[in-house]
Image (cartoon, rainbow, N blue to C red):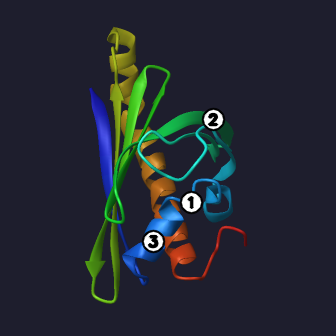
Amino acid sequence: MGHHLELVQHVNAPAEAVWRVLTDIPGSARTLSSISRVEILTPGDYAEGYRWRETRKMMGKEATEEMWVADMDAPTSTTVKAKSNGAAYTTRFTLAPAGDGTRLSMFFGAEMESPGAFAKVMLALFGKLAMGITRKQMARDLEEIAAKAEGRDQAAA
């Protein structure tokens, strides 16, 4: 049982510029306004197995999640995963040429790993609300990634 969403953002920059922004995990708190801090757990460059802790403010509260790169094919796609409170999260970014820019697609999925009856009821009641809030946040993230790749960084403003 789970939920997912997909979003697309046109970026007026080449895929390589978008890729640099997407994979700059140490700098992500300067790019994305909802991220307050990042702790790198795996030294080195962005690659499969790279891990970090990301603290975000959502719905007025801060939450820290450990995330890792599950798959990547630079500069066209990457998949990031996380697990928290009995849920498994998958975020996949795909970059494709689009005219003079890049089509940046994002898939986000949340799956309950072993939901009990209560969790199933709560997911049915509040899952769509939570995904609506998540959709707004992810759309803002994509806009801020585009702004950074295009050289018009808004997060620090």
Task: Say which residue appears at 73% left-offset and 72% top-offset.
Answer: 157
How far apart marks 1 and 2 lie (CA) works out to 18 Å
Rendered view: 154 above or below 47: below
Q: Name the residue under label 3.
A: 18
Query: Depth check: 156 or 59 in front?
Result: 156
- Badge 3, how many Cα within 10 Å: few under 14, some, many 20+? many
Instruction: Give 114 or 59, whichever is nearer the viewer.
Output: 114
The residue to which callout 2 is attached is 64
Could you tell me the amino acid type at mark 2?
Answer: Thr
Kind of residue indicated by mark 1: Asp
Residues marked 2 and 3 touching at CB (< 8 Å): no
Circle 1 residues within 10 Å: few <14, some 14–19, many ≥20: some
Badge 3 or badge 1: first in the primary sequence: 3
Most foreground residue, 39 or 98 = 39
Which callout, 1 or 2, points at the residue further toward the start of the chain? 1
Residue 25 at what x, y percent from top left?
58, 54
* Callout in the foreground (1, 2): 1
Label 2 crowd bin: few (<14), some (14–19), many (20+), radius 10 Å? some
Residue 102's place in the image compared with 122, above or below, is below
Seen in the image, is 69 located left or right of residue 3? right
Q: Is mark 2 on a helix, strand or loop?
A: strand
Q: Position of residue 10 (x, y in %)?
A: 37, 76
User: Could one spot residue 93 in this view of the protein?
Assistant: no
